[in-house]
Image (cartoon, grey):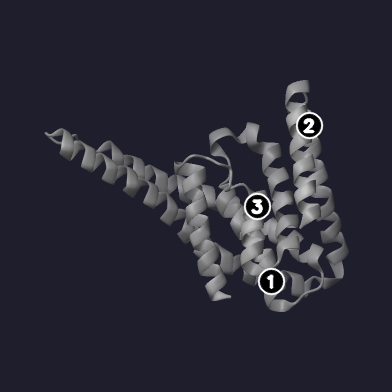
């Protein structure tokens, strides 16, 4: 499991570059994180269940949270990774129950990751403010490039380190929780099934106009198609 945790943490750092400091291709969104983590852990079905649930939850609060949004990369990787690793290491057959626990810890990790990222971002910004242009254009170009690369590296390292710390904790807590609360697994699975529905209703209520509705419907069809194919 240690090698999986390290590899998943490295992936989280790279995805954070895309989400926080790069071209924003949306690879850091939970539904795509599910594909990557599922491939690493060989638990694709559970990864996609957790990814879709987390994606819909964070869709529903994106407009309200604004710049204070959760760290969806850390939360998605931790939540999906925890569910997959618990299933992989324990062989638990209650997939829905374990995924529900993973989603819960992913939501908590998203909030914790946002706090850590803001603290790291403030330090990074103070360091960038101190930049002064050297006397020659060549030196200015070299120093500016070095600052940009170092700034991106800080983003990747902060997020990778967050996952490296949080993921083993989430796996341990998830294993303990699912082991002790076996009798309420049906309730947890019901919560998991209800959660995306509530989030979807919230999304359509908040953005319920003709133009956005078409894109939302198209996205839903694509997601369902991917899940069905996998």
Q: Quadrant of the C terminus?
A: bottom right
> Which residue, given by chain and number where applicable, does mark 2 sit on?
204
Q: Is residue 228 left or right of residue 18?
A: right
Q: Looking at the image, which residue is at 76% across and 61% down?
A: 45
Looking at the image, is 114 positioned above or below residue 3? above
Q: Looking at the image, which residue is at 42% across and 56% down?
A: 157
> Which residue, given by chain and number where applicable, does mark 3 sit on?
107
Front position among marks 2 and 3: 2
Q: Looking at the picture, how far across and down is residue 97, in whole percent?
A: 80, 64
The answer to whether the residue labelled 1 contacts the one labelled 2, judged by CB atoms less than 8 Å apart, is no
Q: Looking at the picture, how far across and down is residue 216, in whole percent?
A: 75, 33
Which of 225/16 is in front? 225
Q: Secondary structure at mark 1?
A: helix
Give the crowd class for mark 1: few <14, some 14-19, many >=20 residues within 10 Å.
many
Residue sticking out furthest to the bottom:
90
Q: Looking at the picture, how far across and down is residue 11, in whole percent?
A: 52, 59
Residue sticking out furthest to the left:
135
Q: Quadrant of the N terminus?
A: bottom right
Q: Looking at the picture, how far across and down is residue 223, in whole percent?
A: 75, 46
> Which residue, given by chain and number where applicable, does mark 1 sit on?
86
Looking at the image, is 88 positioned above or below residue 151? below
Q: Is residue 160 left or right of residue 72?
A: left
Q: Is residue 14 left or right of residue 215?
A: left
């Amino acid at each position: 499991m240690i090698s999986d945790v390290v590899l998943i943490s490295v992936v989280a750092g790279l995805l954070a570059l895309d989400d926080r400091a790069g071209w924003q291709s949306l690879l850091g969104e939970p539904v795509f994180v599910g594909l990557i983590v599922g491939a690493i852990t060989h638990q694709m079905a559970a990864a996609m269940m957790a990814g879709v649930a987390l994606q819909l939850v964070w869709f529903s609060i994106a407009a309200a949270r604004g710049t204070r949004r959760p760290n969806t990369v850390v939360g998605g990787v931790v939540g999906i990774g925890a569910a997959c690793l618990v299933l992989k290491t324990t062989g638990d057959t209650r997939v829905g129950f374990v995924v529900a626990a993973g989603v819960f810890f992913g939501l908590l990790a998203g909030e914790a990751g946002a706090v850590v990222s803001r603290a790291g971002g403030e330090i990074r910004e103070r360091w960038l403010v101190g930049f002064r242009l050297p006397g020659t254009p060549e030196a200015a170009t070299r120093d500016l490039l070095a600052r940009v690369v170092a700034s991106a590296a800080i983003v990747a390292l902060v997020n990778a380190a967050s996952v490296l710390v949080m993921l083993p904790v989430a796996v341990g807590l998830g294993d303990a929780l699912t082991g002790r609360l076996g009798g309420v697994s049906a309730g947890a699975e019901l919560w998991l099934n209800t959660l995306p529905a509530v989030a979807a209703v919230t999304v359509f209520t908040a953005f319920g106009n003709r133009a956005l509705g078409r894109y939302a419907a198209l996205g839903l069809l694509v997601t369902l198609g991917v899940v069905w194919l996998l």
